[in-house]
Image: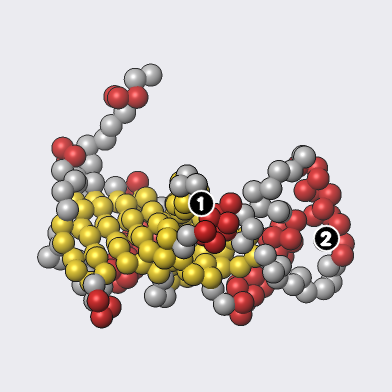
Amino acid sequence: MNLADLRLNYQKGELHEQHVHPDPFAQFAVWFKEAQSAEVPEPNAMFLSTLSASGRPSGRIVLLKTVDHGFSFFTNYESRKGQELAFTSQASITFFWGELERQIRIEGHVEKLSVELSTAYFHSRPRESQLGAWVSEQSARVDSREVLQARYAELAAEYDGKEIPKPDHWGGYRLVPDYFEFWQGRPSRLHDRVVYDAREKGDWECYRVAP
């Protein structure tokens, strides 16, 4: 297989800086709704990039759960991403919707959600997922899957008929953006890229960049 031969000539859409919404959050909402209408599998899946204390980058897919003045997700605070966000709050998220030949890159700083918000979301999750948050010491070495399954069975019995409390080590983060880039695939690799850059007083500068 020649990987160099794997290419598409994107031609499903176009993006003009004169036609986008002046608010990047509103533009995100438009594109997200269109991704849902196109039945993109898990349109809220986003690639979260973080940086270690040694400068080593890492990334993983997490699920977007809320959008307000930022983009929120939930995880184990003691996981690798949690430790890296404790080192530096700067991070980025990327959405890729291949069915629409679109990508959105968002950069900014990450803050923890309040205990109240994290607790409310925790108790909205399926009971099995709540137990899973207790079972998994995320990113820590584990001897076997059987160890996890045994711990799960133990906790399921312990909390049978009881409310499962939110673990202290589990909760939400919000990425508050200062940069958005909306990318639309175009023919001949002359893709459309429209950027929103945060300026003072909370407004945004919108402009095109070269593909």
Q: Which residue is mark 2?
A: 155
Query: Three-letter amino acid code at disc 1?
Result: Ala
**Circle 1 crowding by C-alpha within 10 Å: few under 14, some 14–19, many from 20:** few
Pinpoint residue 42: horizontal percent, then vertical percent: 47, 55
Secondary structure category for the residue under label 2: helix
Q: Quadrant of the N terminus?
A: top left
Where is residue 7? Give x, y as percent.
28, 32
Instruction: Where is residue 188? Give x, y as percent.
Output: 16, 37
Give the residue at x 32% y 70%: 25
Residue plotted at (24% across, 51% down): 184
Q: Mark 1 highlights which residue?
A: 53
- Which residue type carries mark 2? Leu
Foreground: 199 or 28? 199
**Total number of numbered labels?**
2
Q: Is residue 125 left or right of residue 194?
A: right
Q: Is residue 5 above or below residue 187?
A: above
CB atoms of marks 2 and 1 within 8 Å: no
Q: Is residue 113 above or below residue 78?
A: below
Residue situated in front as seen by the camera: 35 or 197: 197
For image coordinates 34% across by 20% down, the residue present is 2
Q: Residue at x 54, y 73 (%)?
A: 113
How far apart in space, not on screen, are marks 2 and 1 (Cα)?
34 Å
